[in-house]
Image (cartoon, rainbow, N blue to C red):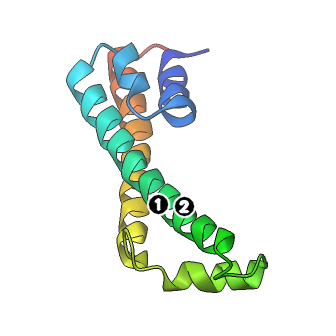
Amino acid sequence: MKKPLKVALFSGLIFPGIGHFMLKKYLTGGILFFSFAISCYFYFTDAVAKTETILTKIQNGEIALDSAAIAKALENINSGFSQQQLSLLSYFMLATWLVAVIDAYRIAKKSFPKE
């Protein structure tokens, strides 16, 4: 497999920034890796907090064990990030991922022109 494709796939399929580490671009790889990791942390922390709130309400009998009731309760939760903030966070994660893949491919293509 050619090096540019290999590093792009590593950044795209494993984790953003891994391809840069393979190219010994540690600063760029670290920035991409940690910005994506921190975004994931905030995203999943919010999801876990909302899930715990819903589960507690179900256990206390405040919400029926019904998908429609749970969906309605999720809309009314005010803890954590708003829907707009989660959308922005998702776009940031997608942009970070795309930049990591494209940049790793670009650097590898420039470093290994015959591959």
The image shows residue 40, relative to residue 57, as above or below, that is above
Which quadrant of the figure has residue 99? top left
The one of 77 and 95 positioned closer to us in this rendering: 77
In the image, 76 versus 56, the foreground residue is 56
> At label 2, which amino acid type do we have?
Glu
Amino acid type at mark 1: Ala
- What label does residue 49 carry, if any? 1
Q: List x then y, in percent, for residue 9.
A: 55, 29
Q: Residue furthest right?
A: 66
| Quadrant of the image occupied by residue 73 | bottom right
Where is residue 64? Give x, y as percent: 74, 81
Give the labeled residue for mark 2.
Answer: 52
Residue at the image position 35 percent from the left and 18 percent from the top:
21
Total number of numbered discs in the rendering: 2
Estimate the x, y position of residue 11 in percent, counting from the top left. Answer: 47, 31
Q: Secondary structure at mark 1?
A: helix
69 to 85, vertically: above or below: below
The percent coordinates of residue 80 (x first, y second) are: 37, 68
Residue 58 is labelled as none
Q: Look at the image and tell me in which quarter the N terminus lies.
A: top right
Q: Secondary structure at mark 2?
A: helix
Residue at (40% x, 14% y) in the render: 22
Position of residue 69 in the picture relative to residue 53 (left or right): right
Query: Residue at image x 26%, y 19%?
Result: 25
Disc 1 versus disc 2: distance between alpha carbons?
A: 5 Å
